[in-house]
Amino acid sequence: MPPSETRDRPACLAKLSDAERDEVERYIADQTKQLLHSVDRMLDAATHVIGFLPNWLITRLTPKYIDPILAARTAEKLTLKQTIKISNALPIEYLGETAVFLTPKMAADIISGLAHPHASKLIAWLCQHKPSCAITLATELAQRGNTNKLLAAYQFSETTRATLSEPEQQQLEQLLALQK
């Protein structure tokens, strides 16, 4: 087994035989699948309830009680219109943390529908705090031809650029060239 596969595993798993380790991994995968199925059912119910709650209440409670990963899963179950309406009223930091868990397509759909000042602030936050996510999102936006208004908000500090991998830096340079 390559070292990269064992790096994230607890040391006690290294003591097991391959068959025992495979059995443990299957058990964990099955349990995770069941848990995610239950979470999805709960989120389905929550999306129905959201339709009856006033937007001000949703936007006040969401950042306080809903982890970004669950917000992302919920966003995928709401209509795009509902998601954008709620997102326009959520804090930028919360949207940025949530964007990491969305598919690039879903994140681009949402950001394309946000009010322009909110979208620009979100992009700026992502560039500073989640640059890899920002680049992935910019690539998705560029593929759609959304290169004018939204890509203009992409600003990476030299410190942030230094944290990017070589392929990400190349991708960033290509995207920034589209702004010119």
Image (spheres, rainbow, N blue to C red):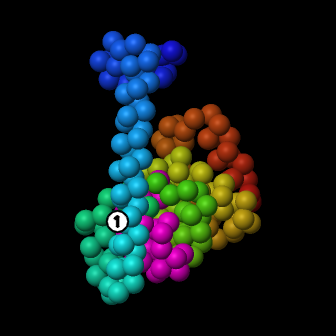
Specify whether 112 is left or right of 31. right
On the question of residue 149 being in view, the answer is yes
Residue 48 location, quadrant: bottom left
Q: Relative to residue 108, is residue 37 depicted above or below?
A: above
Q: Relative to residue 19, is residue 166 depicted above or below?
A: below
Looking at this view, is 165 or 77 the one in front?
77
Residue appearing at x 48%, y 79% in the figure? 82
Residue appearing at x 48%, y 23% in the figure? 5
Which amino acid, mark 1?
Met
Looking at this view, is 91 or 24 the one in front?
24
Instruction: Report helix, strand or loop for mark 1.
Output: helix
Magenta span: helix, strand or loop, mainly? helix
Image: magenta residue range: 74-100
Point out residue 42 in the picture as x, y percentages from the top left corner: 34, 65
* Quarter that holds the C terminus: bottom right
Specify whether 160 is left or right of 55. right
Q: Which residue is mark 1?
A: 42
Point out residue 43 in the picture as x, y percentages from the top left corner: 38, 66
Residue appearing at x 53%, y 46% in the figure? 132
